Image: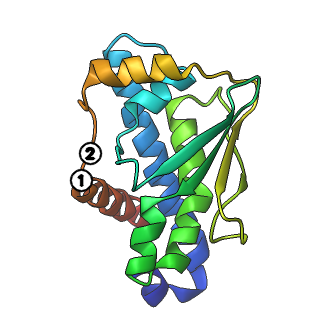
Amino acid sequence: EIERVCPADCSRLTERVVTDYGLDRGRIARENTLKMGDSLDIHNYKAYKSLRTTDDEFVEEVLSYGPDLTTEVRRCCWIDVWRQYGLLEYGKRYCLYCDKAMMRGYNPAVTLEIPALMERDGSPVCRFVWPSVTLCPERVASKKEQLQGRFVMSWGQLTDHLLHCAKQSLNS
């Protein structure tokens, strides 16, 4: 819709909308983490994220647990949906900005680098690197078990949240 209404500003506006959405999702995870009395570390970031998927919808592998946490996403439900509905070009823009903004909204002291994005740069994976961050997967699993999906949003809720953030971004 942004491209239809504002074709000359589409890239800039899409970046703003997706960045604002990512910042807001990160802020919500941050608030939930702090409300529960937990620290804003990578373990809780991964445990408090609002999207939960099954193993066949989202496949992520840890390449290095530290000293620079490095993961690769080999299958992504977001990309599958964009491809299914012919929205892959828009999805590439989403991937470019959302994850970094979520991390910034959650804890701006933690840096996230994304050296590869599937579909955007021809890579078969998305690669995420958190410099100087070490992950203990058992801590993440334990926290997720403790939370029991408490802060998970459905696809519909995530989409509604994206549309809400888009309205706010475009009206500001």
- Determine which residue is flagged by label 1: 157
Question: In the picture, which quadrant includes the N terminus?
Answer: bottom left
| Residue occupying the point 45% across, 52% down | 58
| Residue occupying the point 65% across, 29% down | 110
Is label 2 in a helix, a strand or a loop?
Answer: loop
**Residue 102 as seen in the image, left or right of residue 118:** left
Q: Are marks 1 and 2 in contact (CB under 8 Å)?
A: yes
Residue 68 occupies which quadrant of the picture?
A: top right
Residue 4, position as x, y percentages in the image:
44, 89
| Residue occupying the point 54% across, 87% down | 7
Amino acid under label 2?
Met
Question: In the picture, which quadrant includes the C terminus?
Answer: bottom left
Residue 102, position as x, y percentages in the image:
51, 42
Residue 31, position as x, y percentages in the image:
37, 26
Q: How many marks?
A: 2
- Determine which residue is flagged by label 2: 153
Q: Residues within 10 Å of mark 2 (few under 14, many from 20)?
A: some
Instruction: Please tell me which residue lies in front, 37 or 132.
Output: 132
Q: Residues within 10 Å of mark 1 (few under 14, many from 20)?
A: few
| Residue occupying the point 38% across, 63% down | 166
